[in-house]
């Protein structure tokens, strides 16, 4: 079978990522896919129909609902995990070997992920010592398609006095990544909630038991806690 095109890979990866960090058990609908990819609803609908014909996804309408939800088939999950693996290995290589900052590597990996073979990906993994996480803390799938589940609890979910360790940070917003890095909210940082502002106000946090920072709830939602 021919390798999926870059456009197909983008859709499969988007569906996988939406399922990797579900929002309140919200099913993966066409509208969520088009929002994730910044495309129009008709474009997303047409592509998803193609993917279903190709055997990569299945769609169904839950009982009592008119909107169909989308799921990866086994074939689709394998293809999605392949591009996710390449993306996260490339991010790690660019950060650790080329010295690029963590807010730069996502954009570059988005382009390069479509153009490397599994042979090259395996070689990159070997050179890097088979890393388990990328610079943002996202788990790197194995060549066999195994991937660790990501922690779903977010920094914004914690209450005063609770502690935790940053496990991963959403990597889609470069400006937000720079903002969080400046405050030390990076993978493996230890955090404790000191104060939660009323009516959606800022959250005060100690980072690594020494640094007091304040972040808005929206930024805290991008930080996942183990």
Image: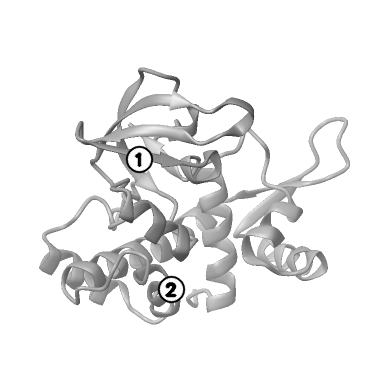
Q: Nearer the viewer, residue 157 or 17?
A: 157
When the figure is inspected, residue 195 is found, relative to residue 99, above or below; the finding is above
In the figure, residue 116 lies in which quadrant? bottom left
When the figure is inspected, residue 77 is found, relative to residue 126, above or below; the finding is above
Task: Kindly identify which residue carries mark 1.
Answer: 213
Residue 25 in picture, x, y percent from top left: 63, 32
**Residue 54 in sight in this render:** no
* Label 1 vs label 2, nearer the camera: 1
The outermost residue toward the bottom is 115
Q: Would residue 158 be found to the left or right of residue 6 on screen?
A: left
Q: Would residue 171 be found to the left or right of residue 208 on screen?
A: right
Task: Kindly identify which residue carries mark 2.
Answer: 107
State the SS at label 2.
helix
Q: CA distance from mark 1 to mark 2?
A: 27 Å
* Residue at x 67%, y 37% (from the top left corner): 26
Q: Nearer the viewer, residue 120 or 151?
A: 151
Q: Would residue 107 be found to the left or right of residue 200 on screen?
A: left
* Residue at x 75%, y 54% (from the top left corner): 31
């Amino acid at each position: 079978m021919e390798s999926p095109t870059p456009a197909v890979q983008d859709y499969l990866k988007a569906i996988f990522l939406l399922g990797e960090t579900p929002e309140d058990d919200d099913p993966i609908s066409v509208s969520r896919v088009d929002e994730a990819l910044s495309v129009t609803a008709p474009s997303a609908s047409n592509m998803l129909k193609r993917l279903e014909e190709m055997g990569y996804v299945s769609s169904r309408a839950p009982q009592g609902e008119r909107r169909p939800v989308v799921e990866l088939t086994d074939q689709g999950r394998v293809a999605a995990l392949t591009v996710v693996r390449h993306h996260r290995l490339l991010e790690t290589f660019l950060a650790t070997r080329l010295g690029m900052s963590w807010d730069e590597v996502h954009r570059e990996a988005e382009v390069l992920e479509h153009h490397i073979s599994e042979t090259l990906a395996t070689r990159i993994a070997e050179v890097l010592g088979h890393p388990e996480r990328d610079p943002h803390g996202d788990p790197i799938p194995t060549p066999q398609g195994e991937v660790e589940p990501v922690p779903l609890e977010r920094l914004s979910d914690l209450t005063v006095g609770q502690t935790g360790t940053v496990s991963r940070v959403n990597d889609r917003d470069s400006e937000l990544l720079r903002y969080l890095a400046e405050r030390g909210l990076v993978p493996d940082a230890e955090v404790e909630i000191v104060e939660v502002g009323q009516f959606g106000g800022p959250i005060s946090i100690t980072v690594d038991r020494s640094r007091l920072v304040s972040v808005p709830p929206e930024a805290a939602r991008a930080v996942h806690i183990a």
